[in-house]
């Protein structure tokens, strides 16, 4: 079981994780306040107690459940341009810088209903290197898809994993003919 809670201003409030990973019990609780993340719990029999500073515009990205990536989508829907000062908190205490390298608007459809989406190209960076990915959201930032090709990871919202879901293509008046 995992849960991430955000405040109305989209700053993280807490994250809880109670899981079995590689046949080992993991229980973590992180609270966010006053520019710090405090994590307590147990990771495969090892007690965890960690306090670390967090940056403004931090979202919580547990590396075991990806629905929490919606926090990033919600933040991006409120920002203009291509922000390069966003951070991911990966429990129990890893800070990952996130840069948006491109953002484009598009449309998707499920059956006969279509809706507008944003697609963000992302680069995640920490001391071990960089990792490219993409995030597709509803206009309000609601989660649609998240992809990390180098990790062979593709996460898709349940209602879009059907054979009738598709990306709609369109041409701009100034596009060259194919």
Image: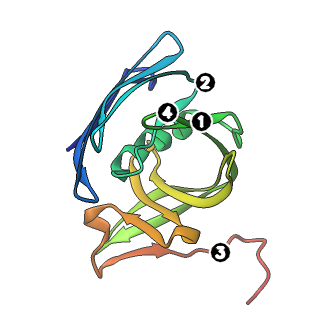
From the image, state whether disc 4 or disc 2 is nearer to you. 4
Which residue is located at x 37 percent, y 44 percent? Answer: 68
Instruction: List the residue tagged with mark 2.
Output: 55
Instruction: List the residue tagged with mark 1.
Output: 87
Residue 105 percent coordinates (x, y)? 58, 57
Distance in Å between CA atoms under marks 4 and 2:
13 Å
Among the two numbered marks 1 and 3 on one chain, the one whose residue lies closer to the N terminus:
1
Residue 54 percent coordinates (x, y)? 56, 23
Q: Residue furthest front?
A: 45
Among the two numbered marks 4 and 2 on one chain, the one whose residue lies closer to the N terminus:
2
Residue 68 higher or lower than 30, as above or below: below
Among the two numbered marks 4 and 3 on one chain, the one whose residue lies closer to the N terminus:
4
Which residue is located at x 58 percent, y 70 percent? Answer: 150
Q: Quadrant of residue 10?
A: top left
Q: Secondary structure at mark 2?
A: loop
Which residue is located at x 59 percent, y 35 percent? Answer: 87
Q: Secondary structure at mark 4?
A: loop
Q: Quadrant of residue 49?
A: top left
Among the two numbered marks 1 and 4 on one chain, the one whose residue lies closer to the N terminus:
1
Instruction: Count residues near mark 2 (Cα–Cα under 10 Å), then give few for <14, some for 14-19, many for 20+.
Output: some
Per the rendering, the mark at residue 171 is 3
Among the two numbered marks 2 and 1 on one chain, the one whose residue lies closer to the N terminus:
2
Which quadrant: the C terminus? bottom right
State the residue in front, 171 or 106: 106
Instruction: List the residue tagged with mark 4.
Output: 93
State the residue in front, 97 or 52: 52
From the image, state whether disc 1 or disc 3 is nearer to you. 1
The answer to whether the residue labelled 2 contacts the one labelled 1, judged by CB atoms less than 8 Å apart, is yes
Among the two numbered marks 2 and 3 on one chain, the one whose residue lies closer to the N terminus:
2
Instruction: Count residues near mark 3 (Cα–Cα under 10 Å), then give few for <14, some for 14-19, many for 20+.
Output: few
Q: Secondary structure at mark 1?
A: strand
């Amino acid at each position: 079981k995992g849960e991430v809670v955000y405040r109305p201003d989209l700053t993280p409030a807490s994250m809880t994780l109670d899981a079995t990973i590689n046949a080992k019990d993991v229980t973590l609780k992180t609270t966010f306040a006053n520019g710090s993340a405090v994590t307590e719990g147990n990771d495969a029999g090892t007690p965890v107690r960690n306090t670390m500073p967090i940056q403004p515009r931090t979202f919580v990205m547990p590396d075991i459940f990806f629905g929490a990536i919606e926090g990033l989508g919600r933040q991006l829907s409120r920002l203009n341009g291509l922000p390069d000062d966003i951070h991911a908190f990966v429990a129990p205490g890893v800070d990952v810088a996130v840069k948006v390298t491109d953002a484009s608007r598009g449309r998707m459809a499920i059956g006969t209903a279509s809706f507008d989406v944003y697609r963000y190209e992302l680069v995640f960076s920490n001391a071990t290197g960089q990792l490219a990915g993409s995030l597709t959201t509803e206009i309000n930032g609601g989660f649609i898809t998240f992809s990390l090709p180098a990790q062979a990871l593709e996460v898709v919202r349940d209602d879009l994993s059907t054979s009738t879901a598709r990306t709609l293509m369109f041409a701009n008046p100034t596009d060259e003919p194919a």
